[in-house]
Image (cartoon, rainbow, N blue to C red):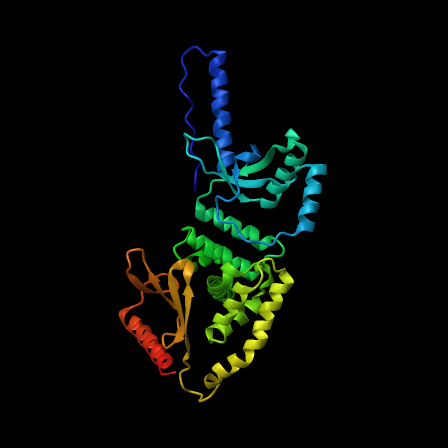
Amino acid sequence: MTTAKKLKSPKMSGTTTSRDVESLINQGRAEGEDRLRQAGLLLEEIDIDQIDEEHFVRDRIAHDEDAFHELRSSIYASGQKTPIEVTVISDPDEPLRYGLVSGWRRLHAIREIFCETRDPGFATINARVLQHDVSSALVALAIENEVRKGISPFERALFIRRTVEAGAFASVDQAILSMYGQASAAKQSKIRTLVRLADFIGAIIIHPDCITEQIGLRLVKYFDAGAGDLKARKMLEEAPKDRTKSEELALLRKYLSDAKPLYDRQTAHDRKGRGRPKVKRFVARHMPNERAVQFVGGRLQSPCRLIASNDGAFRLTFEDGTDLPEEAATVVLEDIANALSKRTAK
């Protein structure tokens, strides 16, 4: 049985003055506020300029203008009903700063209202100050993302990749287990697959919310088979940067339609000769943002990467960042050599 720790009363002199009593009350109030803050139960009014909305990795959720306008009108008419969540990010010797954990739309609505009206009542925002490190804050962000309407599986994948790039997690697998550990094994597998898609085209997709789970998984399936994956990337890179969501979706659907016959030809041998081990086509993809080349297919079966470090050295790793064993690395190098020899023969 756990017993509550008894707090020591502050030592006082034999003569108690009103100043001593006031000091004791202030000490008790400070201790109580600290406990409430640690439990995430203390609401505070914070200057909107003290909050850094980009301190933690932010997702790329599509901005629903109608829903945002409705929220903004509600806050202007009735005030803020739900507090945002923040955590202290400044050093003790610096001016107090907070990192936004959740409540991006509420913060932006109040900032817009203040900019337009200069009403001092909207210069601050009600916030719950939480005790978060980077990893736990990102878990909280992931939870918020899942309960928000409109988040697409591809946006989730982009979010996971960014948490790893920010150093919050050592690998994609660790990020998925930390933020989506309660999901089924099948869902985690789909998330992992879509993160690979985000690695390949995430930087050139303008409207990530247009990629549904079905479209995303089909893209990965076609890319893994080498069915025009580089052509699809080039198509997206050359498309107008101001394209609409419907235009981008049309591009992806056109690629899937055009690539299906090629995919069927590339994978036809896999459907023949039952009992033989299936060997997927060996495909290499350049990942310029990560100074790496990703290899998919071939005899290894598991995707891997050739990574270049700043000192000019190269490493062959699995997707989670662990080095390939010598035997597996030899298999990959042989697949590379075979692919190069076939290309030279042509």
Picture layout, residue 326 above or below residue 343? above
Q: Which residue is drawn at 64% across and 33% down?
A: 122
Picture layout, residue 25 above or below residue 59? above
Q: Residue at x 35, y 77 (%)?
A: 340
Task: Answer left or right for 317 relative to 153.
Answer: left
| Quadrant for the C terminus in the image | bottom left
Q: Across the whole image, how many numbered discs are drawn on residues?
A: 0
Q: Can I make out residue 303 in this image?
A: no
Of the pair 343 and 178, the residue shown nearer to us: 343
Of the pair 15 and 93, the residue shown nearer to us: 93
Of the pair 2 and 178, the residue shown nearer to us: 178
| Quadrant for the N terminus in the image | top left
Residue 47 in the image: x percent, y percent?
Answer: 56, 32
Of the pair 145 and 158, the residue shown nearer to us: 158
Picture layout, residue 281 above or below residue 9? below
Q: Residue furthest bottom?
A: 273
Residue 176 in the image: x percent, y percent?
Answer: 46, 58
Q: Can I make out residue 92 in this image?
A: yes
Residue 338 in the image: x percent, y percent?
Answer: 34, 79
Task: Answer left or right for 163 relative to 46.
Answer: left
Q: Which residue is drawn at 50% across and 59% down?
A: 203
Picture layout, residue 215 above or below residue 274? above
Q: Which residue is drawn at 64% across and 35% down?
A: 114
Residue 161 in the image: x percent, y percent?
Answer: 46, 57
